[in-house]
Amino acid sequence: MESIQIDQELNIKGEVCPYTFVKSKLALEDMESGEVLRVVVDHLPAVTNVPRSLTNEGHNVLEVAQISDTDWAITVRKA
Amino acid sequence: MPVTVYIPTPLRRYTENQARVSTEANDVASLLDDLVSRYPELKTHILDDNYEIPRYVNVYVNEEEIHSLQGKGTRLKDGDQVAVIPAMAGGAQPFSEDQIKRYSRHIILPEVGGKGQRKLLEAKVLLIGTGGLGSPAALYLAAAGVGTLGVVDFDVVDMSNLQRQVIHHVHDLGRPKVQSAAETINDINPDVKVIQHNTRVASDNILDIIADYDVILDGCDNFPTRYLVNDACVLAGKPNVYGSIFRFDGQATVFAPGKGCYRCLFPTPPPPGMVPSCQEAGVLGVLPGIIGVIQATEAVKLILNAGEPLINRLLLYDALSMEFREVKIRRDANCPICGDNPTIKELIDYEQFCGIGPATH
């Protein structure tokens, strides 16, 4: 897989739903359309909830990947 | 050698809220390395992936930008003052952790989001009256995070108010209503700035009072004030979120500038004594809860510019049959204040207009 240019990273390990999505959404609001945000979470429900909510808002979830025993990275391009 | 780094407010939440951080460094590069190793969350805000300073961040040593010195190689000596200044769009303060939690259910809504919540926090709503309608409206507007709430009332809290004026409590009996309301609002949400207008609105003060507000919410209880608030809102070009209650019935609508007003709907008040007041006729205690919260809903929608506002529509509510109905209302081209050729160009004597008091007092 070709590497994706990340414009901003948001580490919200320790945060739980729905604040994982709330903080991801706030970060995207401050970015430009087309820019890419990488969100790192360790709250398992967020791994499905956050991409679903971001997709519902029209953003393009590029990748959801487990990056360590505890952490997941959600990569999303702002609509 | 100790060097002091100034941290501006947007970055302070990553430095444990410290405005100044002391560090030991010989040059700017090692200073930045030291900062981000101590405050890892700061990293993405002041350095890019290659540990270079991004172009939206400037670093100053003793008030000189480092590009005019030796860049990241700029040497530092004991007592130097360093500042890390990011570009700011202006105004958009980041939400605090408490605000993110408090407003999360708003931020999640696509129609609100962080942007909408900021609009609410920056909005100013004036409540005319902190009685039956103003009480529930104020509670919900405060909870929603409307940043400035003005409250106007000249009255004090009376035992007979507590059946419906839910912002006031037993321990407020005898206190000015605006004071009691302000206290309750801040108990709900300390983000809200409450401006108390402990006065009776009148022709000689209302334009000054409403001037600073974005939305006026009319929760008054008498005809002279209705026409006064209406005319003032028309003259000042302010949206007027109207509500009224009587026995088991309520009405609500939004008079937006240029789209009609209360005089288009009711050109003249009923003769004095024909329509009894709530004081004489009674009112169901829960009724203003419905109508006041409809007014609050419309105020929030106006601020967010969301949905279809209740403009040119009069909503009628009958609590006994539990029915809502809606009738159309239109701007009257012959309206004496908002029509094509207005005859009322300044505020008048509304007691006299309503046939209540003498013309001169």
Image: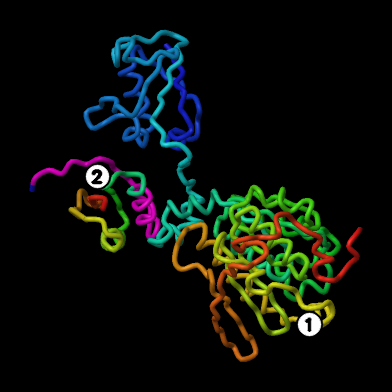
Q: Up-down: is B101 above or below B254?
A: above
Callouts 2 and 1 close, C-beta under 8 Å: no
Image: magenta residue range: A2-27
- Depth check: give the residue in front, B201 or B183: B201
Q: Where, quadrant-wise, is the N terminus of chain B in this rendering?
A: top left
Q: Residue furthest left?
A: A1
- Depth check: give the residue in front, B277 or B354: B354
- Depth check: give the residue in front, B268 or B47: B268
Residue for badge 1: B282
Q: Nearer the viewer, mark 2 or mark 1?
A: 1
Q: Few, some or many C-alpha atoms within 10 Å of disc 1 (few <14, some 14-19, many ≥20)?
A: few
Residue for badge 2: A35
Say which element carries label 1: loop
At label 1, the amino acid type is Gly
Say which element carries label 2: loop
Residue B119, position as x, y percentages in the image: 49, 51
At label 2, the amino acid type is Glu
Q: Residue at x 81, y 78 (%)?
A: B271
Residue B168, position as x, y percentages in the image: 75, 65
Residue B86, position as x, y percentages in the image: 39, 29
Q: Where, quadrant-wise, is the C terminus of chain B in this rendering?
A: bottom right
Instruction: From the viewer's perspective, tell me whether residue B203 is left or right of residue B48.
Output: right
